[in-house]
Every structure is written in structure tokens, then in C-alpha cells.
Image (tube, rainbow, N blue to C red):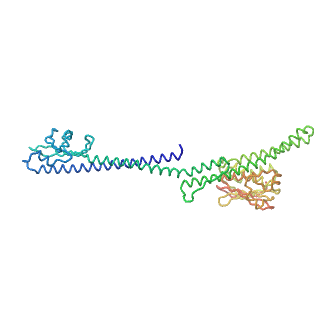
Amino acid sequence: MRLRTKINLSTAVMFILLLILINSASYFTFSRMMLSSELDRTSDEALKTLKGITQTESTVPAKNLLIAYAPVNGMLKIVRPDSSVDQAVSAPELSDLKDFPTMYHKKEKLEIVDYQGIPHAFVSIPMIWEGGEVVELQVIEKLASVEKNLKTLQIVLIIVTLLATIPVLISTRFLSNFITQPITSMIKTMRKIRENGQYQQIELPKKSKDELYQMGETFNEMMDLLGKNFEKQEQFVSNASHELKTPLTVIESYANLLKRRGLDNPELFHESVEAIHSEAIRMSELTQQLLLLAKHDERWKIEKKQINLTKLIEEAVRSFKEAYKREIEIKGDQNIIVKADPQKVKQLFYILMQNAHKYSEDPITVRIRSQQRTAFIEVIDKGIGIPKDDLAKVFDRFYRVDVARTRKTGGFGLGLSLAKEIADAMGAGLKLESTEGQGTTAQITLDVVSFSVNSHNRLV
């Protein structure tokens, strides 16, 4: 069943049930009030009859007294303690009331009694009768007119309920159309996207800012985000395939060369193996970086703990120096304790150190300091630097300042993008300051837990 039909039916049923409930409550309340009013009127008549009988001289026959006070639409009778009827009078057309059940109640009683399908007002009042005997004066009044009025009211309410369902059904249809219109627009837009592969947005009314508008606005924002991500994905796949194409071509060429002449020429054999090995390493590094970049922030496994940042960086510098045989100077005036993931900090630091190693020949400077509960790790090189126009783009995937020069140094344009992903996942800050031809300073910022002064400045 469609959502529009569900809304239409459920709303119509709810309104109709509510209307029936209100009309039923109105009917029962009104009928209760009318019957109660009639019972009070009958009670007043019974009291007047009792007063009249007690004040009349005893020489008047009892039956004549009862006839004088008998109600037009009812019966008046005297009931003895043994539940026998002493006297009873009623209009000739109400002879059926003679069979009305008789009972001595021993106390005053007022109630509405249903007799032969018609409500009757029944009032019983104790009184002193002839010879000092205590009897009950009982008045039974037929409420046929009240019953007729109630039936008329019942028919009117039923007709009103049936007539009211027409505008209810019409209004609920308009309501369901109004509610489902944005959803219908989304469905149509999604189908168009599926058919032509182009992300589109739905038109939103400018007058309303309700939840339906917010849903449509969120849908448009999602479409915009999906469009941008799709463009990035296409660019990413294109760049990745381009980067993998070169090493694969080199490997294929040298492999073909080995098949033709490798066994006869030892120098060519070693040259080919070395080239294939080098390109295989490049492909492995590129693939690893692509896999890391494919991770979403939520999938980074960050395990923060308190670490001595100064000692961690010193160990990392020693390892880097042994691997690349570079001169590195560490500057710092504190032993800084931070709360961070040590492996991610090392990985982030190594990326910045590799950039400094690739683009400079002079000694690299690593400076560790803290200021106002923030720790700073700075990697400073005196290399070729980054042009001002390119500085804001260096964190984009596959972006390279100089393609030819990066190819020579073996870069893929992924390192700084990966560094930014790691820093964001860890909650660390990362920025670059560079002057073309003078060098670059890469800075990592972390929150400090504690520190103690311990100045040091030495070459590693």
C-alpha cells in the first residue's frame, strides 16, 4: 500500500472515529440530562401528591384523591408492606401499566426503569395511610415523548456523522498529498538520477521552514555531497590508474627485455631486475597509501595514552637517520607529556620527515616545544620550498607542485593527504609554512598533559 493511501485511510479513520466518539458522548450526556430532569419533575409531582393527600379530609374516598392527583402519562398507586396494591389509578390509554412490577421498598426511591422498551420515571415515597398504616406512594410516569426525542436526536447525529465523512475524506486526501509531495519529488529525482547518472536537487518552497522543508533541504545537501564525492572518486580513480600505469609499463618492458636478452647479457639482467624491484616497491608504497586513504575517519583505530613526546620523537629521529643517513638536529627545552596514539604520531612524523628528506639536501631540524598547554612538533628543512599559490592545495590527494620533479623523487602526491587524514582522526593539528627557494616548516600540534623543563640542543 502506498504511503499516500496509508495516510489518507489512517487520517480518515481517526477523524471518523473521533467524530463518532464525540457524537456518542453528546448523545449519552444529553439523554442522561433529559431523563434526570424528567425524574426530578416526577419526584416533585409525587411530593405534591403526598402533601395534597395528607392535607385532605379523611371523608374524601381514597380512590377519588388518587384520581385527582394521577399523572396524565402515568400511574399512581398505594402499595402495602406486603407488596400488595391498595389503590391504583391511571389514564385509560395506559392500562398496560397495571402489569408494572410492584414491590414495597421501605424507603424513598427514585430511578429510571425500562419497561416494554420505553423508559419510565419511578418514584416511591413512604406515607401514613388510613388507620395509621405505613404504605408507599408510588408514581410511574411513561416517558414516551422523551424516548421519541432521543431517537430523533440519534438519527440526526448519525446523519451528521455520515455527512461529515465527506469533507473529512476530501481534506485527508489533500493532507496526504501535501505530506507526500516532497517525498514524491525525491522519488522522481532519484529515478532521474538512476536513469541519467546525474545528481539533481528538488525545488523547495521558500515560504515554509517546517520538517518537510528540512527533509528536502537535507536531501539536496546529500545530493550535493554525493555529487562532489562522486567527482572526487572519479578523479581519484583516474589519478590512481595513471600512477599505477607507469610502474606497470616499466615492469612489463623490462620483463619483455629479460625474456629476449636477459640470459645472454648479465648486465642487462641485473639492470632489469633492479628496475623491476624498484618499481615493485613504488607500487607497494602507492597501494599501501591508497588503502590508508580509503579509510573513513571512523575506521581509524586510535588508541590514546600518555606518552613522553620528546623521547618518542628522539627515537623516531634516530630510526630515520639510520635508514636515510641524514644529518638531523633536535631542538627543545622540555620533556613534554601528551595524550595521543604513539604509532599514529610516529606515522605522521615520518611522513613530514620523508618530505623534508626528498626536497632538501641540508641538515633537517626537528624542534619540540610547548606553549599554553599545546605541544608543537616542527620539522624544518632548507629545501626548495612550496610556491604560495600551491601551499593551500598540498593536502589534496595526488596534488604535486612539480610533476616532473616529484616523479624523480618518487612521490605520488599522497603523503600529505594521508598525514592530514591521520591528524584529523587523532584530533591533532597540522599545517605547513613555506617560502619558495628557502625551505618549509611542517608543524604538528597536540594537547599537553604535563611537562618539565629540560633544555637540549644536539645533532643526531
**Residue 313, how many percent across, how many down?**
73, 52
Between 284 and 5, which is closer to the camera in this rendering?
A: 5
Total residue callouts? 0
Find the residue positioned furthest to the right: 264
**Residue 103, how many percent across, how many down?**
19, 39
**Residue 311, how many percent across, how many down?**
72, 52
- When asked about the image quadrant of residue 252, the answer is top right
Residue drawn 15% across the image and 38% down it: 84
Residue drawn 20% across the image and 43% down it: 94
When the figure is inspected, residue 303 is found, relative to residue 377, above or below; the finding is above
Between 102 and 360, which is closer to the camera in this rendering?
A: 102
- When asked about the image quadrant of residue 432, the answer is bottom right
Between 112 and 365, which is closer to the camera in this rendering?
A: 112
- When asked about the image quadrant of residue 220, the answer is bottom right
Between 400 and 317, which is closer to the camera in this rendering?
A: 400
Find the residue positioned furthest to the left: 59
Q: Viewed as shown, does residue 245 lie left or right of 75?
A: right
Find the residue positioned furthest to the front: 93
**Residue 69, how many percent across, how many down?**
15, 49
Q: Viewed as shown, does residue 44 lie left or right of 220?
A: left
Q: Quadrant of the C terminus?
A: bottom right
